[in-house]
Image (cartoon, rainbow, N blue to C red):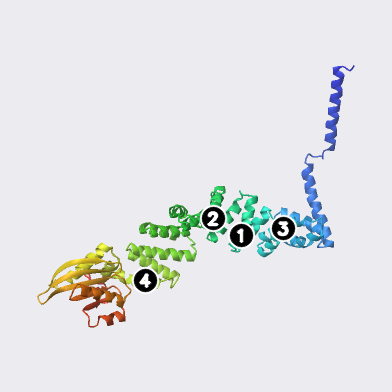
Amino acid sequence: MNSPFTILTVVLIVAFALVLISLLNRTPGGKGKKREKRKDRGTIIREASRRLASNPRDPEGLSAMGNIHYQDQDWEKAYPIYEILVDLAPGHPKLDEFESSLRFGVAAVKTNRLQEAIKGFLLARKLKPNHFEVNYNLGYICYLQKEYEKAVPFLRQALITDPDNVLAQRYMGFSLHRTHRYRDALAYLKKAIDLQPDDKESLFAMAECLFESGAVDRSLKIFSHLRPDPVLGPQSALYSGAIHAQMNQHDKAALDFEIGLKHENIPKEIANELMYKMAVTLIKIQDISRALATLKDLQKLTPGYKDVPTLILRYQELNQNKNLQTYLMSVQSDFVTLCRKIVVQFYPGAKVKITDISVFADYTDIVSEIDTPKWSDIVIFRFFRSQGSVGELLLRDFHARIKDLKAGKGICMTAGQFSDESRRFTEGRPIDLYDKDHLNRILPGPRPLP
């Protein structure tokens, strides 16, 4: 029997022999695989170049060179190779038809050849209809070409394969947003933001969808948050200002528009709208001087934008005529107080008793009893705040009220004009008309500037 010592000796000898064989089989230098790879790449390029020199459409040479350029992301060199391989692949069993079509599509997208890219991806989709990269790229290209309805089914299929892909979620949300399916878009945009929280473009799109879906408060928070952003800030300020204006929070709206206009390199159409809404908002808070300055700047930037020339003429006059500004723009209570002063002062030396004041949407009526040394009677004053034209129907209504109250006269005043029909109607009737020019002369307080 062998002793334990003899058995141990045999085991050691066998182990040593195995280690020695392993060392002998290794490539010198310990980096054989890397060297082999470098050597293989050089060999592949030389062999492929040799094949292509003798036959520019050699499938194996093209496949080898295409693979090199594709791995290097040298898309301009990869594109023409895969353009040929797409045609050759169906007739050569050694070529992978799907890979050739897919890579042709990718190279075409990377070199901005979108129509060619669609061709490649559609060929690949026939072979593998559920492949993520194929469906995503088709959806992305449709989005770039503003064919949003076509993009949706491709992106939906891509998300079935990879539901956590942030780009597929993003462009699915964008496409639904562009097709006005705002509620549907929200889920995808939210997922995209969850996956990539710094995606401000998706955040802005989500705010638009919330706004269009009626969630105004939530959208306002996002737009206000994005106002300082150098890219999305101007448009976000435009949205938040418009929302505040709808809420009659005109001071906040003016601040929003002001923040938006502080940005540099604002797209012209957004700058125009920011300035226009800024001016309109300043008019509503009766800051006529700033409103005029903004309107004049807008007129220089974009002559004839909307009704800017008309607004400049109108409010330039109001800025110079404080009486007319009060008549047209003061709050209702101040306007009624001003009208009362006009009634009291209208007949110098008369005793005036105001018996009724009625405020309507289009006008305000004041019924008064006038007592002068020569006559006494009921006189009705009707005040129009509009700067438009007062038509015949409104004066027929006024005449009917004069008759109902058995008044002796009606005085009708407007900050605008009277139509020719309304003037003809009052001929021979107890109604006196005072247009803007006459109104300016009887308004109490400082006289208009020349």
Residue 244, visible in the rendered structure? yes
Q: Nearer the viewer, residue 301 or 272?
A: 272
Say which label, 3 or 4, has the lower sequence index: 3
Q: Which mark is residue 43?
A: none
Query: Quick check: marks 4 and 1 in contact, CB under 8 Å?
Result: no
What amino acid type should be assigned to the residue bearing mark 2?
Answer: Asp
Q: Nearer the viewer, residue 119 or 382?
A: 382
Q: Which residue is mark 1?
A: 151
Q: Which residue is mark 4?
A: 312
Separation (CA) of disc 4 from disc 1: 46 Å
Q: Which mark is residue 184?
A: 2
Identified at 22% across, 80% down, the residue is 429
Q: From the top left corner, tell me how far across and down residue 442 is, in percent.
A: 21, 73
Separation (CA) of disc 2 from disc 4: 44 Å
Say which label, 3 or 1, has the lower sequence index: 3
Q: From the top left corner, tell me how far across and down residue 140 is, in percent.
A: 62, 58
Q: As drawn, is 112 to the left or to the right of 33?
A: left
- What secondary structure is marked by label 2? helix
Separation (CA) of disc 3 from disc 2: 29 Å
- What secondary structure is marked by label 1? helix
Say which label, 2 or 4, has the lower sequence index: 2
Q: Which residue is mark 3?
A: 124
Question: Mark 4 Cα within 10 Å, few/some/many (few <14, many 20+)?
Answer: some
Give the total number of marks visible in the rendering: 4
- What secondary structure is marked by label 3? helix
Q: From the top left corner, tell me how far across and down residue 238 is, in percent.
A: 44, 60
What amino acid type should be assigned to the residue bearing mark 3?
Answer: Ala
Query: Farthest left residue?
Result: 373
